[in-house]
Image (spheres, rainbow, N blue to C red):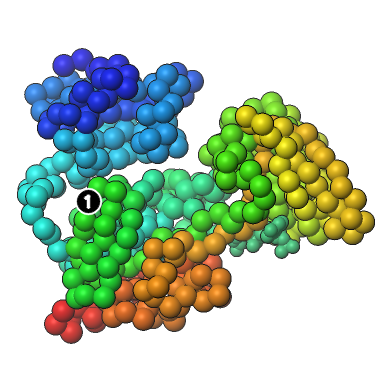
Amino acid sequence: MPIMDMNAEAYEKYVAQTDEPVLVEFWAPWCTYCRRLAPALEEIARRYQDSLAVGRIDIDKEPGLAEREKIELVPTVMLYRGGRLLGRAVVPRSGEELEELIAATLHQRQERGEGAQHVYDMIVIGGGPGGYTAALYAARAGLDVVVLEKLSAGGQMALTEQIDNYPGFDQGIDGFTLGEKMRKGAERFWAETYPAQALSLELSDKVKRVETSQGALYGRTVVLAAGAVPRQLGIAGEEEMRGHGVSYCAACDGMFYKGKRVVVVGGGNSAAADALILSRICERVILVHRRNTLRATKIYHAPLMEAGNVEFRWNSVVTGLLYDAAVSGVRLRDVVTGEESAVECDGVFVSIGRSPASELVKGQLGLDSAGHVIADESTRTDIPGVFAVGDVRTKALRQIVTAVADGAVAVHFAQEYLAGGV
Ligand code: NAP
């Protein structure tokens, strides 16, 4: 069967309303990776013509569908059956990765029997470095482990352009690739990836239940590895203009502001890294920081000063957004003089730190005043069989290496817990 060019109507017909498996590529005409993947997708369509329908959706023509399916990067290839998402490959680079997607999801679930209630030894919530390290250690220890991941492997790390402080990569590595390597490393030992969002958790019973956007999962232990979410400025219009001029991720959204003027808010490593990325894309970058010097490590200072199109507004806070259908500027206040001013811009990138993604466990697990799940170096939480790893946990240093260490430690104590006869 040839590859179908799908619009929203065809998507409803083939994806939502048939029981047959359907592989769908979300792509864009301007995307180089999509062009490179095209022959591999054709080969897959030919090879699986008897068992799989294959379609393509142009996200420029179907932006609503892309938004509904939470497509953030192209190409993203989704595998559905009976309207349910079984698996997802974000920016696959080869036919082998598509084969892996088909083998790891379609075949695995078929063997297990889809309707049956399966109880995993471990459910890992979040596919960042802490989550996939837990999955790797658990899978190598022979535990039946599933990783719940709503977007792509790597978590926050996947959005980092260059990582130089994770040992073993003498030239550094980009976060997306490192995340994919961690996923594949765990899947090599049969850890399963479940592409869905956790919606609610019931943790108190011996068999814990995780309600997800794709149905319920059951597990004897749960590892919370949900990471952190961007902190908001808390100004009027911020939520409303999200995606219409307000962004929290330069690596994801920077290209939408090609040749335009943008404001970056913050003075830490994230703001500095974002300003650098944007300086290569945008006509002008205005970095607004509430102090008169950057908190970011020295390595960022010289490239930012030398960029030529980066302007600094020191001692300034954003007090308001100027917007109608889209953002047209920000209002600033000088924290020293109290002077108010306005800056015209097409986009605002908010890079003022992160808050732990602990909403799901509020009321069930102890949290500190900033919302981190209280757990010591053992990663054990208040509830037996529930562990917290990485940025969501109370800890002194939130880095990839410390998240990875947490993942290994959590499995050590999970095995001890499981050996206790649970
Ligand atoms: P961060 O280090 O906590 O910095 C947050 C920045 O935002 C600070 O400059 C802070 O100002 C400012 N800020 C906070 N709340 C604000 C508000 N309401 N209004 C205006 N400004 C506000 O956060 P981050 O930069 O996101 O980094 C988080 C962690 O990730 C850090 O450990 C960082 O080192 C790490 N990281 C590392 C790299 C790298 O190594 N390449 C890259 C990105 C992130 P003050 O300075 O006044 O507090």
Q: Dot 1: within a 10 Å radius of its alpha carbon, few (fewer than 14), some, or many (20 or more) residues? A: few
Image spot of residue 304 (x, y percent): 75, 45
Image spot of residue 291 (x, y percent): 81, 59
| 369 versus 258 height, above or below | below
Q: Residue at x 78, y 57 (%)?
A: 290
| 222 versus 109 height, above or below | below
- Is residue 365 visible in this depiction of the protein? yes
Q: Residue at x 41, y 28 (%)?
A: 64
Question: Looking at the figure, which quarter contains the C terminus?
Answer: bottom left
Is 179 in front, or is 11?
11
Res. 66 image quadrant:
top left
Q: Secondary structure at mark 1?
A: strand
Horizontal side of residue 239 vs 35, given as left or right: right
Image spot of residue 82 (x, y percent): 16, 35
In the image as oriented, which residue stretches furthest toward the bottom? 420
| 414 versus 195 height, above or below | below
Res. 11 image quadrant:
top left
In the image as oriented, which residue stretches furthest toward the right? 337
Horizontal side of residue 269 vs 35, given as left or right: right
Residue flagged by tag 1: what amino acid is it?
A: Gly
* Location of ligand 1 given as a quarter of the image: bottom right
Image spot of residue 270 (x, y percent): 63, 53
Horizontal side of residue 174 vs 322, given as left or right: left
- Is residue 139 visible in this depiction of the protein? no
Q: Residue at x 28, y 71 (%)?
A: 203
Query: Total number of numbered labels?
Result: 1
Q: Residue at x 51, y 76 (%)?
A: 368
Q: Which residue is mark 1?
A: 215
